[in-house]
Amino acid sequence: MSESSDNEMNEWELNVLKNGMLGEKKQENIITLKNAQMKESVQNWDDILSYFDNKIERYNQANKNSQQNIESCVDQIKKIQTHLIQSENKLQELTQLSQQQELVKEIIHDVKIPTEKKITELDVLEKKMTVI
């Protein structure tokens, strides 16, 4: 009986050991599974963060491009303003020249008419002189 009791005890101990090992193995499997799930979760978060990082980078690049386009447009506007100012100055100069030309025409007209009268009078006088 003692031998059979030892055998039973050994079987019982074996079962306890097996169950204990299985329990440890089960715990290891659960821990491994949880670690895998956490890694997958972390990977998912990394993917999400990477997605938003890429979005932010694209928005920043688009913003930079827009800023450069705005600066380019501002430069073009400044050049156009300078050109318009130069054109306005030329127009004023041409307007002054045109006004001066009109004045010169009036002066010529004013001088021409009396001069023609004087020439006519001189011609008449000359004819009178020749007659005399």
Image (tube, rainbow, N blue to C red):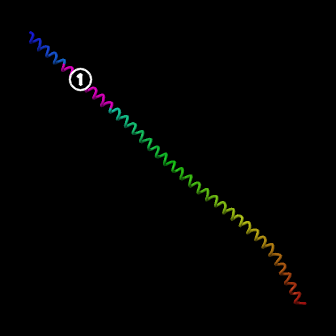
Quarter occupied by the N terminus:
top left
Compared with 18, 93 (above or below) is below
Compared with 132, 67 (above or below) is above
Q: Which residue is depicted at the point 84% across and 78% down?
A: 117
- Left or right, 67 with respect to 97, comes to left
Q: Is residue 33 magenta?
A: yes
**Where is residue 94 drawn, in percent x and y?**
69, 65
Q: Nearer the viewer, residue 126 or 63?
A: 63
Q: Nearer the viewer, residue 36 or 92?
A: 36
Q: Nearer the viewer, residue 120 or 99?
A: 99
- Left or right, 13 with respect to 131, comes to left
State the image quarter where residue 112 is shown.
bottom right
State the image quarter where residue 48 is shown.
top left
Compared with 74, 32 (above or below) is above
Count of numbered circles on the image:
1
**Where is residue 84 drawn, in percent x and y?**
63, 58
Q: Which residue is depicted at the point 20% across and 20% down?
A: 19
Q: Which residue is mark 1?
A: 24
Q: Give the residues in magenta.
A: 17-38
- Left or right, 115 with respect to 63, comes to right
Q: Which residue is depicted at the point 86% across and 87% down?
A: 127
Amino acid type at mark 1: Glu
- Left or right, 77 with respect to 32, comes to right
**Where is residue 10 drawn, in percent x and y?**
13, 16
Quarter occupied by the C terminus:
bottom right
Q: Which residue is depicted at the point 16% across and 15% down?
A: 12
**Mark 1, residues whose alpha carbon is within 10 Å: few (<14), some, or many (≥20)?**
few
**Where is residue 118 drawn, in percent x and y?**
84, 79
